[in-house]
Image (cartoon, rainbow, N blue to C red):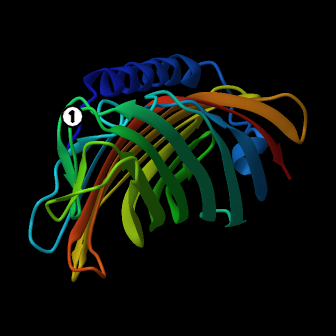
Amino acid sequence: MKIRSNSALVAILVLVSGLATETALAASEEGSAASSLFDSKYTLALGGFFPRVSTTLTLNSPLGGGTDISAEDDLGLDDGTSSAWLSFNWRFQPRHQLHVEWFQLNRKGSSTAGRSFTIFDTTIGVGASVNSKIDLNLGRLTYGYSIIRHNNLDLSFLVGAHVATAKATVTAAGNVTVNGTPVVGESRTESSSTLSFPLPHLGGSLTYEFTPKLAGQLTLLAFALDIGDYSGSLLEVDAFMAYQLSKHFGLGGGLKYFNLNLQANTSRGGNVEYDFEFFGPAIFGYASF
C-alpha cells in the first residue's frame, strides 16, 4: 500500500492524541449520560467532504506499455475538490449496528502534455492537448459489534465491504499516436476505463461521550484483496466530534483519510491500476431518533 501524505497521518495522530487527553480529563468529571447521537436507534447525517487528492493511474495494453500517470501533474486535474457525503446508522440492538456511507469525487481537467505517456495503445506526446475526467464513487456497508459498551464508552469491532467504482476518460489531440500510427491533423482520440468491485474490510471504532451533548469518535478500517483478476487495498481513518443541538438534531466535523489502490484485468486484455489518496475535513448535520 502506498501512503504518500505524512502530513495527513500527523494531523490524524494529533487529533487522536487530543481525543485521548480530553477523554482522561472528562472521565473524572462526567457522569454516565449518553448523548442521543450514539445511543439512538437511527442516525442520518448529511454533509460535505473537502479533501486534497493525489491520484495515479496506469492503463496497460495487452502488449505491455502503459505509463504511471499523475492525474494532477500530467492531466491537469485540481488536487482540491469537494463532495457531498451521506451516512446512515441503525443500532438495531444495544450492541449491534449497521452503518451505510456514500460519497463521490468527480474531477475534470485540461492540460498540454509536458512529457510523453501511454494509455492502452495510445501514446500522448509532448505538446498534445489533453482533456480528462476521473470519477470515483465510494460506498460502504459495515456491521458493528460493541465489544465494550459501558456508561459513556463504546469500543466496537467492524466488518463489511466498500464498493468502489472508478472511471477515467482521457481525450487527446495533436502529437498523438495509436499503435505507432500518428493521428492525422486535429483528430482526437479517446481512451477510457471503468473499474468496479466490492472491497471487504475489517476494523474498529472508539466512541466516547465527554458530556451529554459532546461526543467524539475514531474509526479505523483496512483491507487487502487478491482474488482472480482483481486486487486492491484500502486504509480509512475517520476522526469526528459531534455536538447535540437539541433532542434530535446536531452538528459535527472532523477529518477523513483514505488510501485506496484498485487493480484489475480488462476485457480488452490489458490491466488497469488506480491509486487514490485523499485527506481533508468533513462537516455534517445529523438527525437522530
Q: Quadrant of residue 226?
A: bottom left
Q: Check the image and name the residue furthest to the left.
A: 64
x%, y% of residue 141?
Answer: 55, 66
Q: Which amino acid does label 1 sit on?
A: Val
Q: Which of 196 and 22 lies nearest the eye of the viewer?
A: 196
Q: Which of 35 and 218 lies nearest the eye of the viewer?
A: 218
Q: Quadrant of residue 174?
A: top left
Instruction: Identify the residue shown where x is 71% and y is 63%.
Output: 90
x%, y% of residue 123?
Answer: 20, 52
Q: In this view, does 236 lie above or below 94?
A: above
x%, y% of residue 127?
Answer: 27, 32
Q: Check the image and name the residue furthest to the front.
A: 185
Count of residue discs: 1
Instruction: Identify the residue shown where x is 63% and y is 42%.
Output: 151
Q: Is mark 1 on a helix, strand or loop?
A: loop
Q: Can residue 164 be seen in this view?
A: yes
22 to the left or right of 65: right
Q: Is residue 242 visible?
A: no
Mark 1 crowdedness (10 Å alpha carbons): few <14, some 14-19, many ≥20 = some
Instruction: Identify the residue shown where x is 69% and y is 46%.
Output: 38
x%, y% of residue 88?
Answer: 70, 56
Residue position for label 1 = 126
180 to the left or right of 53: left
